[in-house]
Image (cartoon, grey):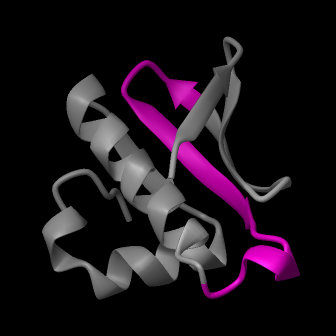
Amino acid sequence: MEIAHEETKTKGRYTATIEGCTGEMTYSRSSPRLIIVDHTMVPDELRGKGVGQALAKHAIDEARKGGWKIIPLCPFMRAQAMRHPDWQDVIQA
């Protein structure tokens, strides 16, 4: 699954498209070292295919590469962060 990234100065999103359907995870950048993941949406057609998990993992990988932290306001991202203690190095509560 390939994940695309779009970003402006203050907002961004990761998208994954499969079979013509797109799931997304959006965020706001509150500082150069902090993003707030505020929304994850996976259409019904993609549920159960690991799209949300792939988007969450991609956000974690990007935070590690970029040296920033994530505040998981989105309920899905917050739940994923709680399930993955190995992500805590880039999660800010």
The picture places residue 81, in percent across and down from the top left corner, at: 37, 74
- Give the residue drawn at x 18%, y 78%: 85
Figure check: 67 above or below 17 = above
Left or right of 58? Residue 72 is right
Figure check: 13 above or below 25 = above
The picture places residue 41, in percent across and down from the top left corner, at: 78, 66
- Start and end of the magenta stretch? 29-48
Left or right of 29? Residue 44 is right
**Farthest residue in the top direction?**
9
- Give the residue drawn at x 34%, y 57%: 92
In terms of depth relative to the viewer, which is nearer, 83 or 51? Answer: 51
- Give the residue drawn at x 25%, y 78%: 84
- Give the residue drawn at x 41%, y 49%: 58
The picture places residue 83, in percent across and down from the top left corner, at: 32, 87
**Farthest residue in the front direction?**
19
The picture places residue 51, in percent across and down from the top left corner, at: 58, 67
